Image (cartoon, rainbow, N blue to C red):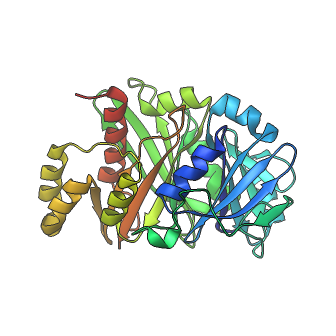
């Protein structure tokens, strides 16, 4: 039943031209194929080892009306898709059509065999050699996306343990770490789940119902239920990547200058990099294996739920409390507006 890797991630949208342009022109994804039918139009975007499908049409309308633009399918490549599906259903997942299950909210997981392609089967795909006007080939963007590092999911209060248990029992993705984060009068819990190979990582978040409502509650309300909060893209040079994509129109969450004074005290070995980090607005964290650098975008989508992250790892394997707190505080500052 083991999950080997993510085959593709499919995003439903009511404005495919804008979304495809965002990934192609700003992040350097290349359009590699299109599929058109009466009720579904899809574009296959690729950058590094990441495959992103952007879809629209009648088949996506119910999802987008309920949830807005969002991730609708995270396909898993499995050793034995049939056995994985049976295991996931026994663990509490819901059936989602032939060869797929749903484990949280309206997001489904299509289960693929090891030899499967990197886009949904059964669609009339036609390869393309050219992207939209203004698109930038991936190789011209400095520090472009290499692969999907992790997926963050917001859940309703009380759903965290059951979802993590389902991923462990149903998909063979054990708990890697857990964290309780307090920010002012708000708090949330998180569990990181990862497959044995370390190629698929989920960060699950739920609010503490005994504290004031915060951003996780707000996400679930605006999204019409649990769903994917952000996709994290692994890059090889985050400073140049942030500068490139910011110049191409991507907006990032702001980082206060006081943050870098704390980083200098907490990560003394990185003192020489603090000026570059501050200039680009990049966050830093460390675990026992090394450190990581990251920055979160503002949501480019109308409902403001789904956003993206750039992350660079220097040996770090996990997510320390400073990492998760940085995300929480960044989003909270953005929700509150200018100070």
Kindly give the residue lying farthest to the bottom in the view shown: 115
Residue 90 visible in the current orientation: no
Residue 194 visible in the current orientation: yes
Q: Give residue 104's position: percent from left, percent from top.
A: 65, 42
Image height of 322 relative to 189, above or below = below
Q: Residue at x 68, y 34 (%)?
A: 64
Rendering quarter of residue 56: top right
Q: Give residue 218's position: percent from left, percent from top.
A: 48, 28
Taking the image as shown, residue 226 lies to the left or right of residue 2, namely left
Rendering quarter of residue 188: top left
Along the line of sight, the residue nearer the viewer: 319 or 73: 73
Q: Residue at x 22, y 28 (%)?
A: 339
**In this figure, what is the number of numbered marks?**
0
Image height of 172 relative to 281, above or below = below
Which of the image's four quarters has the N terminus? bottom right
Rendering quarter of residue 208: top left
Q: Give residue 120's position: percent from left, percent from top.
A: 77, 60
Q: Residue at x 34, y 43 (%)?
A: 253
Taking the image as shown, residue 236 lies to the left or right of residue 231, namely left
Q: Residue at x 79, y 57 (%)?
A: 35
Kindly give the residue lying farthest to the front in the view shown: 133
Q: Give residue 156's position: percent from left, percent from top.
A: 56, 33
Image height of 96 relative to 83, above or below = above
């Amino acid at each position: 039943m083991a999950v080997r890797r993510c085959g593709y991630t499919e995003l439903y949208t009511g404005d495919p031209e804008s979304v495809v342009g965002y990934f192609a022109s700003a992040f350097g994804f290349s359009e590699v194929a299109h599929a058109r039918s009466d009720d579904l139009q899809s574009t296959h975007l690729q950058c590094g080892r990441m495959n992103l499908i952007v879809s629209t049409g009648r088949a996506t309308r119910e999802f987008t009306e309920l949830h807005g633009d969002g991730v609708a399918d995270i396909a898993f490549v499995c050793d034995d898709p049939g056995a994985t599906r049976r295991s996931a259903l026994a663990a509490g997942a819901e059936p989602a059509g032939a060869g797929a299950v749903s484990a949280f909210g309206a997001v489904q997981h299509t289960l693929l065999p090891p030899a499967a392609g990197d886009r949904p089967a059964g669609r009339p795909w036609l390869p393309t050699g050219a992207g939209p006007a203004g698109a930038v080939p991936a190789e011209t963007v400095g520090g472009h996306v290499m692969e999907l590092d992790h997926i963050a999911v917001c859940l309703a209060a009380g759903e965290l343990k059951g979802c993590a248990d389902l991923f462990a029992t149903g998909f063979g993705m054990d708990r890697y770490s857990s964290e309780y984060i307090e920010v002012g009068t708000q708090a949330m819990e998180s569990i990181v789940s990862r497959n044995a190979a370390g190629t698929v990582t989920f960060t699950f978040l739920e609010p503490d119902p005994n504290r004031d409502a915060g951003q996780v509650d707000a996400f679930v309300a605006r999204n019409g239920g649990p769903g994917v909060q952000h996709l994290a893209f692994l890059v090889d040079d985050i400073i140049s990547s942030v500068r490139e994509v910011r110049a191409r129109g991507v907006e990032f969450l702001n980082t206060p200058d006081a943050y870098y004074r704390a980083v200098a005290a907490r990560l003394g070995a990185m003192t020489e990099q603090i000026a570059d980090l501050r200039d680009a607005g990049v966050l830093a964290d460390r675990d026992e294996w090394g450190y990581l650098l990251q920055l979160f975008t503002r949501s480019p989508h109308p409902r403001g739920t789904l956003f993206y992250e750039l992350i660079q790892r220097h040996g770090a394997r996990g997510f320390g409390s400073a990492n998760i707190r940085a995300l929480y505080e960044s989003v909270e500052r953005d929700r509150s507006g200018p100070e």
